[in-house]
Amino acid sequence: MRLLARLLVCLALPAWALAADLPPPLQNLTQQGGKVVRSFPVPDGLTGWVVELQGRGMILYTTAGGDYAFTGPLLDKDGNNLTSRYADQYIPVPDAAKLAQALAADTSLVDEGSPRAPLVYVYADPNCSYCNKLWTELRPYVVGGKLHVRWALVDFLKRTSKGRAGAILAADNRAAALTQDEQRFDHGQEEGGISELRPVPLELDAALKLHDQELQESGNMGTPTLLFRRGGSWNFNYGLPQDLPKLLASLDADP
């Protein structure tokens, strides 16, 4: 009976669901922590694949023989970007509003700025040099009462990230602790400026794990990741904004 049940399960799965049946480049990808979500047909003997790598969905293609894989824009004879179409069709869009709702009830954030100002959530690692640059560039807006920032700390960049994030969250004044981490940031070593907390209490460790999971669900596993409301809807910005003043000027006034 067990053998029959196993056989039925295997028959129900597509061939690529078994790692041994994947083309060699995709087998290598799964060994590096990637995940193959599905396959789909592509013209001219190519096979399309939806994969997740470091929390992000992407489109890959394998050649007819299966020995080569590539990614990037796939253009047809009329110049249409098929990769963009496949991404819209097969890669789920992260639910920014749902994530914003979860963050609104989160008691383990670092809160700074005027609660009456436009609101931005930021996922940040205490050892992230780009997060430090963003923190520095946001100072005039926060201090001037023009921006409300709530920082969701994550802890995946370096071995010391968890201890530093834990120290910030355990502080009586989290905003002051974050300021210490950022003002004393060592860019040469890419290390935050606050001493590690060891061990990190279980409840704070659970909060950091939740933020890591949320960041992955946002469609990005990089910091900083911003979540903000513009035009009545919530939006993501991955990495440092190319034009921070323009982005902040576009935020909805009602937090």
Image (tube, helix red, strand yellow):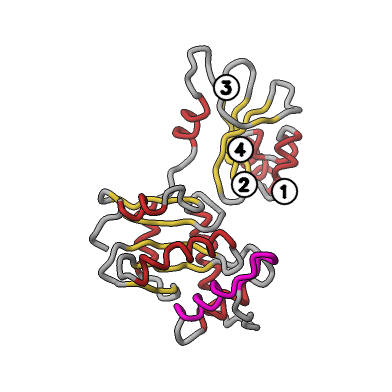
Which residue in the structure is indicated by mark 4?
13
Q: Which mark is residue 53?
A: 2
Residue at (70, 66) in percent of width and height: 189
**Numbered range of the magenta stretch:** 174-192
Q: Which mark is residue 96?
A: none
Using a 10 Å C-alpha cutoff, classify the residue at mark 3 as few (fewer than 14 neighbours), some (14 to 19) or many (20 or more).
Answer: some
Q: Which mark is residue 42?
A: 3
Find residue 132 and report its horizontal and vertical position in percent.
54, 65
Tell me the distance, in whole angstroms, between the alpha carbons under discs 2 and 3.
Answer: 21 Å
Find residue 154 and report its horizontal and vertical position in percent.
55, 66
Give the mark toward the camera: 2 or 3.
2
Q: Is residue 149 above or below residue 23?
A: below
Label 2 SS: strand
* Residue 184 forms part of the magenta stretch: yes
Looking at the image, which is closer to me, 86 or 235? Answer: 235
* Residue 57 forms part of the magenta stretch: no
Using a 10 Å C-alpha cutoff, classify the residue at mark 4 as few (fewer than 14 neighbours), some (14 to 19) or many (20 or more).
Answer: few
Which residue in the structure is indicated by mark 1?
32
- The residue positioned farthest toward the left in the image shown: 254
Looking at the image, which is closer to me, 249 or 3? Answer: 249
Using a 10 Å C-alpha cutoff, classify the residue at mark 1 as few (fewer than 14 neighbours), some (14 to 19) or many (20 or more).
Answer: few
